[in-house]
Amino acid sequence: MEFNASTANLLKIKADSLILPTGLELTTTAKEIDDALDGAITSLIESKDFTGKTGQCSLLHRTEGHFKRIVLVGIDSANTTQKVISAVESAATVILKTPSKKAVWVADGLSNDHQWLASIVARSFSTATYAYAGTGIKPTPKTLKALTFWSAAKKDSSAAKTGLAYGTALGNGMNVARQLGNLPANICTPNYLASQAKKLAKDQPNLTTTVLKEADMKELKMGSLLSVSAGSVEPANLIVMNYKGAASNVKPIVLVGKAVTFDTGGISLKPGRGMDEMKFDMCGGASVFGVINALLATNLSVNVIGIVPAVENMPAGNATKPGDVVTSMSGQTIEVLNTDAEGRLILCDALTYAGRFKPDTVIDIATLTGAVIGALGKVTSGLLSNDDDLAEQLLDGGTRSGDRAWRLPLWEEYDKQIKSNFADMANIGGEAGTITAACFLSRFTKSYKWAHLDIAGTAWLSGAQKGATGRPVPMLMEYIRSKASEN
């Protein structure tokens, strides 16, 4: 979709639809439109068909003039970031159900920060146009091709253009992550992800991709990672995508994304009901792809290395068994009490590998524990970190983007739960599974600033709307953008 900014006379812009945020007390622009329509908006309010509640959308059809329809978007005096995003997403859903080819978004009402609002508009409309394609599914093409972000003041136009460019890149990056997550596991294998990483780097001077095969990982003594892929006919891959947007002496941000392309649980087999959704167990890795894609579009002045350990976890005669002891790349030994706690087994070796890049920070992203859903539901991601400043920066990025996280503790009392009689540690603890999983990972991250995002509750939706969400690409990009501003 094409996005542009304008401050031209609103009533002279040619478009099929006008999207007009307003409350019961009309905004300045809404009053002007209402006057031009002989009080049509006022009449709609008086009829109580439009209540002005944030996110409510009402369609007003016209028989003459440039706009065939006006979509009124409700706003109220208690707008928050989440409410504004919800209102924009609601409007995108409504307008995409119409035959509109070109629409205009009026910037009044929702936020005075036109750069931020424009980024939310572009992001929301870009993600709203996504439809899964592949495996015989041919989505109905969306008719909306262009959206103009209109501001009354010329001084806001430049900020809006910047926001639109960023929001478009972000929305497209989320869609990349969603598409990878939605593909079935017989297509989206570890080798497929490796091929997509190489394809992403093609003709991109700022990006290089390296793929380590199982022989390379054996040489590096990644016994923990390889213990997960042992029972699968699909070989593991360790994908490394190196985005260079800043000087070589600028320490990189390293993103480590868990990519279990299908998780049966291994010998500790999962229940059959809902197991199809375990194709989404690679959404952490998919989010790294989404971020790299967005970075290529924005050209942010920052160095980012994306590491994606990609495996399939299957039961077989040669699969790792509960009680087996494996040796990680760090030299620490692990008693595998549960083969369904496999994500941490691949992440620990990837986190050790991340240290060779002398990172500024390392952030791992993983659909790691069902326990995080019990704690936080499907609304927010879990965040744990060994660095308070890094944690706060990520939380701030989540607040700005509406892609929120909540911090959980990493206390010694929890770490004691992963004690083992037969190895340096066990791969599961007792209570507080999200925290003990992070405690496990923290044992491999002592040499750098590190944060862990557990996205098991936010990476995909179940039910009628089943599909990957593209989270936490917005949060990660906000954090990276803030770091780029320091360079």
Image (tube, rainbow, N blue to C red):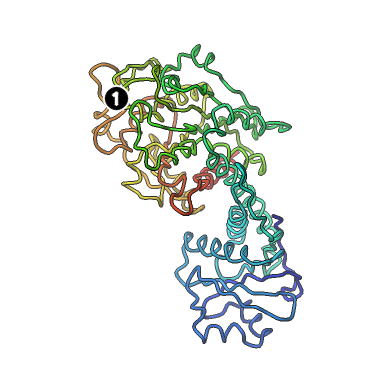
What is the quadrant of the C terminus in the image?
A: top right
Residue at the image position 24 percent from the left and 30 percent from the top: 417
Residue at the image position 57 percent from the left and 46 percent from the top: 174
Q: Quadrant of residue 68?
A: bottom right
In the displayed structure image, the side of residue 471 where residue 141 appears, left or right: right
Is residue 160 in view from this perspective?
A: yes
What is the quadrant of the N terminus in the image?
A: bottom right
- The image shows residue 253 at horizontal and vertical percentages of 53, 33
Q: Which one is in front, 311 or 249?
A: 311
Number of labels in the image equals: 1
Residue at the image position 52 percent from the left and 31 percent from the top: 254
Alpha-carbon neighbours of circle 1 within 10 Å: few (<14), some, or many (≥20)? some
- The image shows residue 77 at horizontal and vertical percentages of 47, 72
**Amino acid carrying mark 1 in the image:** Leu
- The image shows residue 335 at horizontal and vertical percentages of 31, 20
Q: Quadrant of residue 163?
A: bottom right
Residue wearing tag 1: 337
In the displayed structure image, the side of residue 167 where residue 339 appears, left or right: left
